[in-house]
Amino acid sequence: MRLGLLSDVHATLPALDAVLTELDRLGVDRIVCLGDIVDLGPQPNEVVARLRERDIPCIRGNHDTLDEGPALPVLAAVEEWTRERLLPEHASWLADLPERRWEVLGDLRVLCVHGSPHGIAEGLLADTPSHRIEQWTDGLEWDVLVAGHTHVAFTRREGHRTLVNVGSAAQPFERALTVPPRVLPYCDFAVLEARPGGPDVRLCRIPQPMEEVRAAYRASGFPHCEQWLRTWD
């Protein structure tokens, strides 16, 4: 049994389609999206439609609320632009998404969140202290914790359990918590498999179809488009 995991698509259909094509090629049994489906990208309706068309289970990310109220003017303009263009049925679908999801993979209990089990805007990093993990998961029985949000992929053992951040399918960062971030021209995602010895985690990276991505931004009327595209340079 293999589970495909992706996150932080950020309204970028060429990136989502590239990841789904690769997961189909790999023959995963199920796919879960860990949130930040919209905002910061040019195709919010198209991305929601694709996920619904594929019947992919999703959880809600902080950007999916579209009420972040970012301080930076460019981010505020993008959030408003997304809110104005999102179809009402897609906005309702996003609002109804849960903030966590459990998957059973063989004998593994897999807890899927966007940021952390404590909140959708908290980040799971490679150096998140063990005591913080214990606080976040107090009272929960889990074997694998998977998240997105930070746009930086990693996996690490935490005692007999496993932590996974799948990174971003559309805007992976060179490193976490840098402003402004350097965005890499790849699509990050993960494949989780139950093996007799425990979970097997494969962090995956494929080239992002940047010509299609740039064309989508420019055709959409995305605010501050050329400034935004320079984050990939």
Image (cartoon, grey):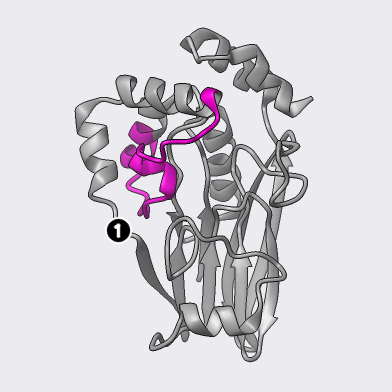
Residue 5: where, in percent of width, then height? 53, 57
Q: Looking at the image, which is closer to me, 59 or 15?
A: 59
Amino acid under disc 1: Pro
Q: Is residue 201 above or below residue 30?
A: below
Residue 43 position in % (x across, y down): 44, 24
Q: Quadrant of the C terminus?
A: top right
Instruction: Inspect this view and state whether residue 106 appears.
Output: no
Between 113 and 143, the one lying in front of the other is: 113
- Tell me if residue 99 comes above or below residue 208 in the rendering: below
Q: Nearer the viewer, residue 90 or 209?
A: 90
Q: Is residue 225 left or right of residue 53?
A: right
Query: Which residue is pictured at 65% across the width and 90% down the height?
Result: 159
Determine whether 204 is above or below 90 in the image. below
In the rendered image, which quarter is residue 47 located in?
top left
- From the viewer's perspective, is 120 left or right of 90? right
Q: Residue 136: horizontal and vertical position, in percent?
A: 47, 77
Residue 218 in the image: above or below residue 139: above
Q: Residue at x 67, y 27 (%)?
A: 209
Residue 14 covered by magenta stretch: no
Q: Is residue 207 visible?
A: yes
Magenta stretch encompasses residue 55: yes
Q: Position of residue 80 (x, y in %)?
A: 38, 24
Residue on which the image places disc 1: 98
Residue 88 appears in which quarter of the rendering?
Answer: top left
Classify mark 1: residues with Cα within 10 Å, few (<14), some (14-19) or many (20+).
Answer: some
Direction front: furthest residue:
71
Count of marks overlaid on the render:
1
Element at label 1: loop
- Residue at x 51% of width, y 60% of height: 122
| Magenta span of residues | 48-73
